[in-house]
Amino acid sequence: MPRVVLYQPQIPPNTGNVARTCAATGSELHLIEPLGFTISDRHLRRAGLDYWPWVSLQRHADLVGFQAERQRRGGRLVALSSQVEAAYTDFRFRSDDWLLFGRETDGLPNALQASADARLTIPMARRARPGEGGVRSLNLSVSVGIVLFEALRQLGPAEGGERG
């Protein structure tokens, strides 16, 4: 089952919505600190509703701690960014992938993106270009849902994907 990783998330309701998606799919949720809120934040809890007991949540004190866990468990690091051209729909996901999403305000640092095994984007019709108008990115929780459900669709029931 692909794992969802949020790098230093800043907005409690986004993380709560991602947690709800992870509960619904049985996907692990990894949070790389520092967080822009406390886990007890009422907005975070409200967005996750009463599904928190079904969230397999792991917190990592920093990027080094997360990288050690990923190294121990194996799997590819798949970074999602609005700054790349490779579409997530053209990628073949595997059950041991770590789907890495960046901060709401500024995404993933370039060095972290460069260390990933793959860098993908969600194509948008009105993507912002330098000096032009357009959409910079999608909401974090929406992006997680789009990519995670595509990975699960590809993997099918035998790998934790489609369910009846």
Image: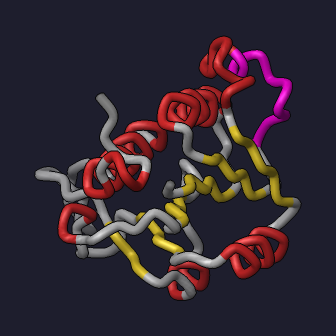
> What's drawn in magenta, residue-wise?
36-45
Left or right relative to 86: residue 104: right
Vertical position of residue 30 compared to residue 93: above or below: above
Q: Residue at x 46, y 71 (%)?
A: 78
Estimate the x, y position of residue 156 in percent, counting from the top left: 29, 50
Vertical position of residue 143 compared to residue 155: above or below: above
Question: In front here: 35 or 146?
Answer: 146
Estimate the x, y position of residue 39 in percent, counting from the top left: 82, 32
Dominant secondary-structure state across the stretch colored magenta? loop
Q: Residue at x 28, y 71 (%)?
A: 92
Residue at far left of view = 125
Estimate the x, y position of residue 146 in percent, counting from the top left: 32, 44
Q: How many marks?
A: 0
Q: Residue at x 80, y 78 (%)?
A: 68
Left or right relative to 61: residue 110: left
Scheme of colours in the image:
secondary structure
Tell me, yes or no, whether the highlighted magenta stretch contains residue 95: no
Question: In front here: 78 or 37?
Answer: 78
Tell me, yes or no, whether the highlighted magenta stretch contains residue 37: yes
